[in-house]
Amino acid sequence: MSSVFIEKPASAVVVGEHIRFRTISPHDTTIYTGQVISIGNYAVAKIFGDVAAIHQDMLQQNPELVDVSLLKYLIVECHDKKRRPFAIEWIQDGKVSIVETGNTKLIRIYNTSPTDIKQIIALLRQNDITCSIVD
């Protein structure tokens, strides 16, 4: 699936948008992708994860973050179907990429070994292309 990315401030995200971003945590190398299902305060966010513990990790990168209970949170249903809370202040550079979905292309690969197919998929993913193998 090929996607188009449009960058915007995390604070301007609305429910229903598909977003892509990284956190400011030096320990988290994940590029999160998913749909914003809710935007809320600490009471809402703690339903979806241990935001206090996550906040402690984020404080290592930015010790000037305000108290965890004062932050605004995006609740994101990630590509793995898990719902996770992210404070707007935890998002790297304060920006997300809006992912325009629905632009799916089919690529057929013929007469190729399973090892080569895995390498092709790895190369596509290294270039930020969301893809999968469909047998």
Image (cartoon, rainbow, N blue to C red):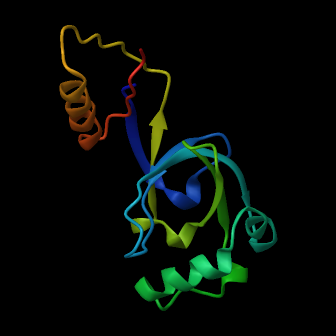
The picture places residue 65, in percent across and down from the top left corner, at 54, 86
In the image, residue 50 sits, relative to residue 75, either above or below, namely below
Q: Quadrant of the N terminus?
A: top left
- The structure residue drawn at horizontal position 43% and vertical position 74%, both measured from the top left corner, is 25
Q: How many marks?
A: 0
Q: Nearer the viewer, residue 20 or 106?
A: 106
Query: Would residue 32 be found to the left or right of residue 3 on screen?
Result: right
Query: Would residue 98 be found to the left or right of residue 13 on screen?
Result: left
The picture places residue 24, in percent across and down from the top left corner, at 42, 72
Q: Nearer the viewer, residue 40 or 134?
A: 134
- The structure residue drawn at horizontal position 37% and vertical position 63%, both measured from the top left corner, is 29
- The structure residue drawn at horizontal position 38% and vertical position 39%, both measured from the top left corner, is 5
Residue 66 falls in image quadrant: bottom right
The picture places residue 39, in percent across and down from the top left corner, at 71, 57
In the image, residue 63 sits, relative to residue 123, either above or below, namely below
Residue 126 falls in image quadrant: top left
The picture places residue 10, in percent across and down from the top left corner, at 52, 59
Residue situated furthest bottom in the rendering: 63
In the image, residue 33 sits, relative to residue 27, either above or below, namely above
In the image, residue 71 sits, relative to residue 85, either above or below, namely below
Query: Would residue 126 be found to the left or right of residue 39 on screen?
Result: left
- The structure residue drawn at horizontal position 68% and vertical position 73%, both measured from the top left corner, is 50
Residue 53 falls in image quadrant: bottom right
Q: Quadrant of the C terminus?
A: top left
Query: Would residue 7 be found to the left or right of residue 112 on screen?
Result: right
Q: Nearer the viewer, residue 22 or 89?
A: 22
